[in-house]
Image: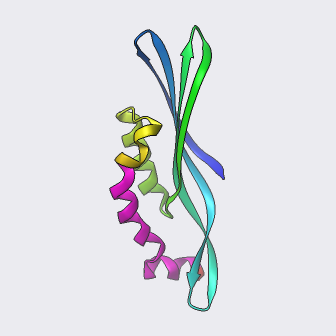
Amino acid sequence: MLIVEQLNRVEEIGGNNYLYSYRMIKKEVVVPFYDCSTPIQGYGIEVERQELVNGVVVNIERDIVATISPYRHKVRELLKVLYANCVSPIHLIDVLGEYIDEYVIDFNGSDFIKVCTN
């Protein structure tokens, strides 16, 4: 897994500071293609929230969706939505669930497979 892009923000809630990190990650995914398998790049998102009290990290929460789409621009748009709305790791799947279901077809699209295998 490789971090491709990271967006950070700090929020103050109830006197505590929370550091949110939104990361686009890249990893190789093996996609079945006729009689063989084809390795391709897939992009996903990791969200991390660190709770800081007096500058000391007292709690870390993290969630990840390792592979969402082979199209970087689609995952980048989701990353920006998460960042803009300060989505916590706890709600990552709630927010991205429908997009993930929709984007899974990107790995099976015949046009995509043709491009990857030529």
Residue 55 screen position, x and y as percent:
60, 11
Main secondary structure along the magenta-highlighted residues: helix
Name the residue at the right extreme: 1
Magenta-span inclusion, residue 106: yes
Residue 51 screen position, x and y as percent:
53, 21
Q: Give the image's coloring scheme.
A: rainbow
Which segment is the magenta one? Answer: 95-116
Magenta-span inclusion, residue 108: yes
Q: Horizontally, is 116 left or right of 84 in the view?
A: right
Callout count: 0
Q: Quadrant of residue 6?
A: top right
Residue 41 screen position, x and y as percent:
59, 64
**Closer to the camera, 98 or 3?**
98
The quadrant of the image that shows the C terminus is bottom right
Residue under the image location 46 percent in, 77 percent down: 108
Residue under the image location 58 percent in, 50 percent down: 25
Residue under the image location 63 percent in, 59 percent down: 27
Residue 43 screen position, x and y as percent:
54, 57
**Closer to the camera, 37 or 59?**
59
Name the residue at the bottom extreme: 35
Q: Is residue 106 above or below residue 15?
A: below
Residue under the image location 44 percent in, 44 percent down: 79
Q: Is residue 113 above or below residue 84?
A: below
